[in-house]
Amino acid sequence: MLNYEHAQQKGKCLLWTGARVAEEALVAVLARKTIAIEPRDGGVPAVSMRGLGLSFGGSGSTRRVILEGIDLDVREGEFLSIVGASGSGKTSLLRILAGLIRPSAGEASFRGQAITGPSRDRAIVFQDYSKALLPWRTVRANIALGLEARGVAREAQTPIIDELLDRTGLAHAADNYPAQLSGGMQQRVQIARCLAQQPEILLMDEPFGALDALTRQTLQDEILFLASDKRITIVFITHDLEEAIYLGDRVVVLGGSPARVMQTVEIDLPRPRNQLTTREDPRFLAHRHRLFTLLANERGAGRIKSAAQRDKK
């Protein structure tokens, strides 16, 4: 007599095992792929980094090296995700691209010109949205900051702000102050203000890290739409591997001490992306498996290195 429950459970195990084998096979194929770093159009990349390094302190034991030997191009119109463990220099790299800090070695350039300071062409979205907005200004007035920086006449600002309010879903909150908004809405204001600058590249430092899952996914789709609609190049820092894969054309993994580019992964998933079907795609799962394994191995190697250094003391 057939034990139905036993057969059903066995069937589930076989399905799970088959899916896991297929996933591991796909990971192996992806791992053998050659990752091209040339810009899509074959011309000058939007951003280029060559031999980039960053260190603090003096010389010898007091010197702390954060980044070393970073060679990386960001293609025009690309959505580039950067992941890495805490302290791997992701935010420092983004601040160099924004022109907020100078590299200690090498060079970063934007469209062939060395980055020596901030520019309206390069807008940065900070993780802490609550400190990025002016609390005494309304939503509309906060967005207007980007237009004021461009020297747009006051009478010409209203239609531009209205369009940005519509695009970011903030039209109903135009006259509210930041303290009256949810975290997701505050982050939308910061993004809208950056877009008001009409930047050529958007630098985003874990912008959705402090938000709940549903709000985060909503904003992920909104930023993908805006990037496509405005044809903006985006460099996106995140700790969330699934977020990096879902958003990115490529994912760059930083690791080591000092941090270097460990690997660059081409994300061969069709656009537009979908929160359900994209995340269920076997290629998505394979990329997640590959990145997780890479970072887990790096974390293990880092612990062994730290233990060895402690033993020497």
Image (cartoon, helix red, strand yellow):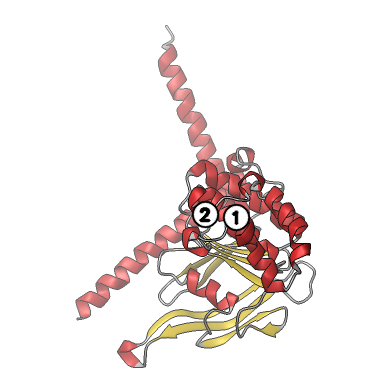
Q: Is residue 31 left or right of residue 292?
A: right
Residue 244: image location, x then y, percent: 56, 55
Q: In this orientation, does residue 130 appear?
A: yes
- Is residue 202 positioned above or below 224 on the image? below
Front residue of 182/25: it is 182
Front residue of 297/145: it is 145
Residue at which label 2 appears: 178
Q: Earlier in the sequence, mark 1 or mark 2?
A: 1
Front residue of 91/263: it is 91
Residue 103: image location, x then y, percent: 52, 84
Q: In this orientation, does residue 35 appear?
A: no
Helix, strand or loop for disc 1: helix
Q: Residue at x 45, y 29 (%)?
A: 13
Residue 110: image location, x then y, percent: 68, 78
Instruction: Assess whether mark 2 and mark 1 are in contact (beta carbons under 8 angstroms).
Output: yes
- Is residue 275 positioned above or below 257 on the image? above
Which quadrant of the rendered structure holds the N terminus?
A: top left
Residue at which label 1 appears: 139
- Is residue 187 positioned above or below 3 on the image? below
Residue 83's disc is none
Residue 65: image location, x then y, percent: 41, 82
Which kind of residue does numbered mark 1 sit on? Val
